Amino acid sequence: MVGLRRKIAEKMSLAKSRIPHITYVEEIDVTALEELRATLNKDKRGDRAKLTLLPFLMRAMVKAIADQPNLNALFDDDAGIIHQHEGIHIGIAAQTPTGLVVPVVKHAEARDLWDCAAEVNRLADAAKSGTATRDELSGSTITITSLGAMGGVATTPVINYPEVAIVGVNKMMVRPVWDGTQFIPRKMMNLSSSFDHRVIDGWDAAVFVQRIKALLETPALIFVD
C-alpha cells in the first residue's frame, strides 16, 4: 500500500482500534423536505448551486450542535483531553478516483443553505480533480458520509479520528407508511450515525439524531432561529 490508500488504511485502523463505536440508526420521513427542495431548486437564481439533501442536513446538524456542543469536538485520547470547538467544520466524505478524502466546509454555522450548497460543490469538484489543498482536506470537527443512491438500508460508519461523531446518509426509498387509517407512500431515508462511546453516551447520541430527524421532517424549522 502506498500514497493515499496507505493513509486511508492507517486512519481507519487508528479509528477502529482506539474508538469504541456505538451506531444509532433512525428512519427519517423526508417527503416534505424533498417537496421543499424541489420548489427551491425550481425557483432558484441562476447563480445559485442546485440544492441536494446535504445542505439541509448540514443546517440541521448546526442547530442540533447548538443544543449539544459536546458533539462538535475532538478527543485527544493520548492526553485525555476533549477539545470542544465553537466553529462547526463539517467534513464531507467523498469518493475520488484515487480513494476516499474528506473535504471540509469551514464554519458551517455561519453559512446559509445556498452557501453550504455552493461550498460542497466547490470542494467536491476540487477533491475529484485532485486540486484540493491540504487546508481544504483538514480541520473537520464532525463528518457526514453518504453513498448516495448506493447508500444501502443501513451502514456502520467509521468515525473520522479524532472526531467523536459521524452522520451517515443512506439511500432514499418510497415506502408504505401507516397514517392511522391507511398506508400511504412516503419518501423515507435512514441516518446511520456513529459516536465515540467514551465521550458520547447512548442517550446523548439518540437525542442528537432525534433533533436532526425533527428538523428534517419539518424543514421549516431549519429556517427558524
Image: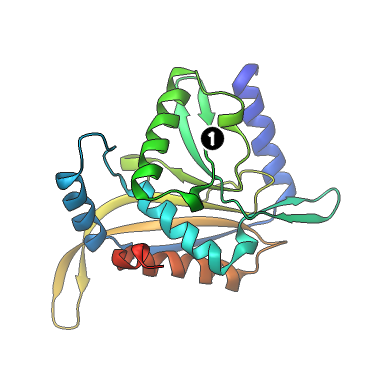
Residue found at the far right of this picture:
79
Question: Is 199 left or right of 112, judged from the image as shown?
Answer: right
Q: Examine the rendering and report whether any part of residue 38 can be seen.
A: yes
Question: Is 58 left or right of 13, judged from the image as shown?
Answer: left
Q: How many marks?
A: 1
Q: Quadrant of residue 70?
A: bottom right
> What residue is shown at x 38% (from left), y 43% (from top)?
115
Which residue is labeled 1 in the image?
102
Q: Quadrant of residue 7?
A: top right
Residue 172 in picture, x, y percent from top left: 29, 52
Closest to the observer, 38 or 191: 38
Residue 142 in picture, x, y percent from top left: 57, 49
Question: Is 91 left or right of 29, judged from the image as shown?
Answer: right
The image shows residue 184, relative to residue 166, as above or below, that is below
Q: Quadrant of the N terminus?
A: top right
> What residue is shown at x 25% (from left), y 53% (from top)?
173
